[in-house]
Image (tube, coloured by chain):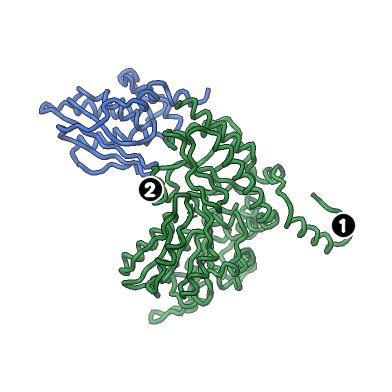
Amino acid sequence: MTGLTDLYQEVILDHNRAPRNFGALPDANRSGIGHNPLCGDQLTLYVHVSEGGRIDSIAFQGKGCAISKASASLMTEAVKGKTVEEAEALFGRFHDLLAGPEGGPADPKALGKLAVFSGVREFPTRVKCATLAWHTLHSALAGGGKETTTE
Amino acid sequence: MSTPSSTTTATTATRAATAATATLDVARVRRDFPILATTARGKPLVYLDNANTTQKPEAVIRATDRFYREQNANIHRSSYVLSEVATAAYEGARERVRAFLNARSTREVVFTRGTTEAINLVASSFGSAFVKEGDEILITGMEHHSNIVPWQLLCARTGATLRVIPIDDRGALVLDDLHRLLTERTKLVSVVHLSNALGTLNPVRAIVSYARAKGVPVLVDAAQSVAHLAVDVQALDCDFLAFSGHKLYGPTGIGVLYGKESWLEKMPPYQGGGDMIASVTFEKTTYAELPHKFEAGTSNVAGGAALTAALDYVTALGLPAIAAHEKELLAYATARLAELPGLRIIGQAPEKASVVSFVLGDVHPHDVGTVLDTEGVAVRTGHHCAQPVMDRFGVPATVRASFGLYNTREEVDALVAGLRKVREVFG
Ligand SMILES: Cc1ncc(COP(=O)(O)O)c(C=O)c1O
C-alpha cells in the first residue's frame, strides 16, 4: 500500500474541494496571517472569541495545497465552540499525531475527524502544510497579530 | 563503441571524432551513477531534479575517497611531500577548470563555495571599488535569488539602484529593454545564462557585445548552463562567470568565479585571513597574487580533487553529445506533457534547455510533488528560489522536471504516468 491513499483521504479531498467556514468574518476580534514561504501558501484566519473565552465563530481565507486547505477547514470545524484552552490542547494532540513520538497521541479518539491527517506522518515535508492553520490560530489567539511563518 | 586501431595517435583521433558526433550511451552512463540503481518509496528512483543538484558518478565518489585516503594535507603551507600532493590536486583542479572554461590563465579561476558565494564576492569586492550612489546594476526578471539579493545588499550599502530587464509571456528576455535600461549609470550587468525556473537560454553573447560597446562589464550566472552546453569564457567574452560543482556532477561546497584578470587585479580582497596574503605586519598587509588574493582560509581541497573528476567525466562524454541527448529528451517531455489536460507549461521561450516547469490545473504543485514522490519520481515543487518569476506568471509555485545526462524517455513516461495518477486522486 502506498501512503498516498492514507494521505489523501476522501475527507481531505472533500474539504480541499469545498472548504468549510471559508471567507472573511466581519465581527472577528482576533485574526492572524500564516505564510509558508517554501510553497507560497498564505492563509488569513478570523476568530471571534466570546467574553467567556470561547471560540464562537471562526473562518479563513487564502490559498494553498490540499493538505493546508483541508487542515484549515477541518480545524475551523473542530475548534468552533471550544474554549481557547481546549483549542490549544487539541493543537498539541494534532501535532503529536503528525510529528510526535512514535505511535502518535495517547488518545487518538480525542482528535475526532482530525485523525484523517495521520497519513501525513509518512511525509515529513508535508507536516508544515498541515500545521500552518494551527500555528496561525495559536498566534491569533495569543493576540500577537504578527505574521506566522513556517520557516 | 570502440574502434580497434594500431597506433595510439589514431585511437586518440578516432575517439575525438567519435566524441564530436557520438550519441550518448545512456544505458551505459547510468551504470556510472550508483544512486540511480536505488529505490525511493519502494519504486525505482526517477531523478528529475537535476537543476537542484545532480547525482555523482563513481569517478567523483572515488576521487573524494582517494583524496582522504592518500592525498590529504593542507595546501600551500607545508614543507613535506604530502602537502605537495594535496596542493597539486587542488591547483590541478584549477587548471582543469581553466581548460574547461577556456580561460586564458589560472589566475582568472577563483574557487568559492559555489555560485552564490561567487556572485557575493563580485557584489562585495567589485561593488566596493566601483559602485557608488546613483549608479545602477542591471539584472533580469528571471534571476535566481542568489543573483538578486547580493545586488540589493550592495545597493542598500551604496545608494545604487537595481534595474531589471523584463521577461515576456513566453519567458524570454525583452531585449529591446536592455537597450533602454543599459545607460551610462550602469556599472555592471548580471544575467543568468540558463534559467533554473523556466529553462530559458539567454543570448549572453549578444548581451555581452552590447554591454561591451558601452564599456559595461557582464557577469554570467552559469550555475545551470555549464552542465548542459559547452561554455567558453573567451567566446562569450564575459567579464565574470560563476558556477557550482554540485550541479555539474561534482561535489557540493566548491564552485568557481571566473574573472578577467584585468578586473580581478583592480578588485580588493573579499575576505581576509590565511592564504590570501603575501606578508602581514600590524602596520601593513600585502595581498597574495591572483587568484589566491580571493581565497582566504583553508580551501575545499577534497572538493577540488572531486571537481577535477567531474569535469573529466563530463568532458569525456562530451558536452555536445550531452546537449543533444537532453535536447531530444526535453522535446519528448514537452510533447508528452502537452497530452495532459489542464497542464500549462510555464516558460516556452524559443531557446530552452533541460528544464520544464509547469502547473497542472488547479492542483497545487506541492500535492503534485507528493503524488509523484509516491511513484519514486523526484521533481522540485515550489518557487525555485525565483519568486519574481512566479509572480510574473501569476503562480505561487510550479512543478519542475529538470534533466541530466542520465535521464531517459522511460523516466519521462514515469513522470507522465505519475501526473495521470495526480488526476485520478484530484479529479
Ligand atoms: C541559476 C542559478 N543561479 C544560482 C544558483 C545558486 O547556486 P548555489 O546554491 O550552488 O550557490 C542556482 C541554484 O539553484 C541557480 O539555479
* Residue B69 in view, yes or no: no
Q: Is mark 1 within 8 Å of ligand 1?
A: no
Comes first in the chain, label 1 or label 2: 1
**Residue B82 location, x and y as percent?**
63, 65
- Give the residue pinned by disc 1: B5
Are the residues flagged by discs 1 and 2 from a single subunit? yes
Q: Position of residue B181 (x, y in %)?
A: 40, 66
- Residue in view at x 72 percent, y 46 percent: B25
Q: Secondary structure at mark 2?
A: helix
Question: Given the image, on which type of amino acid does mark 2 rest?
Answer: Asp
Q: Which chain is mark 1 on?
A: B
- For chain B, give the colour: green
- Between B243 and A100, the one lying in front of the other is B243
Colour of chain A as rendered: blue
- Residue B301 position, x and y percent, is 57, 61
Which disc is residue B391 wearing?
Answer: 2
Real-space Cα separation, disc 1 to disc 2, in angstroms: 58 Å
